[in-house]
Amino acid sequence: MLREELWRDVGALGGFPIFFVLTLFALFFSRFLFGSLLIGFVLTLGLTTLIRAIYFHDRPIKETYNNFIRKIHASSFPSLHTMRASLVATVLGMSIQNYPLFALFLVTAAGVGYSRVRSKRHFIKDVVVGYILGVLIGLASYYVAWRVVF
């Protein structure tokens, strides 16, 4: 039981509330970090919505839907939680430039993906693609913010 709660909590690290608080925190301490996370947020949400609108894939435990927004939420591909977690790991890791800490961030993001599979919210391919897209979007948003802010 404790193990299940732990994995649920790890999965929450990729959720919107954590991402929102982290981005808000960055607003007060680093314009660059805030810009990178904001750009990444827009890109991850836009790309996920586009992919799920074109390619619908049921979750392991199917969800019912009756409108477009619910349908996007009911689709499992790609994992938005994993994408956000790997986006944050990439942006923070590149900003801090501490390689052991960067590796820890990336492993934590992988743990988010594992928790999503374990909780039957996603299939393995959903989290792998979400992880890769999150890292790529993290790199892109980091460099775009670097150009805009500096």
Image (tube, helix red, strand yellow):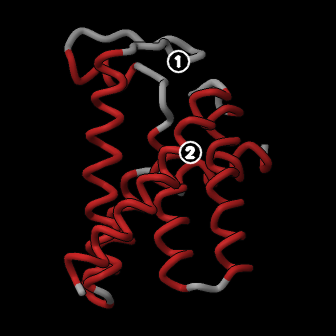
Point 26% across, 81% down: residue: 27
Secondary structure at numbered mark 2: helix
Name the quadrant containing residue 104. bottom right
Report the residue marked by disc 1.
Answer: 59
Name the quadrant containing residue 72. top left
> Along the line of sight, which residue is nearer the eye, 102 or 15?
102
Dot label at residue 132: 2
Q: Residue furthest bottom?
A: 29
Point 29% across, 31% down: residue: 49
Where 30 sits versus 117, above or below? below
**Across the whole image, how many numbered discs are drawn on residues?**
2
Point 48% across, 24% down: residue: 76
Q: Which dot, 1 or 2, sits closer to the camera?
A: 2
Q: CA distance from mark 1 to mark 2?
A: 19 Å
Seen in the image, is 3 located left or right of residue 81?
Answer: right
> Along the line of sight, which residue is nearer the eye, 4 or 134?
134
Indicate the position of residue 135 as horizontal and vertical percent values.
Answer: 52, 55
Q: Amino acid at mark 1?
A: Arg
Indicate the position of residue 75 as horizontal and vertical percent values.
Answer: 42, 20
Which quarter of the rendering shows the C terminus?
bottom left
Point 48% across, 31% down: residue: 78
Q: Amino acid at mark 2?
A: Ile
Where 71 sits versus 92, above or below? above
Which quarter of the rendering shows the N terminus?
top right
Q: Judge the density around disc 1: few (<14), some (14-19), many (≥20) Cα neighbours within 10 Å.
A: some
Where 83 sits versus 50, above or below? below
Secondary structure at numbered mark 1: loop
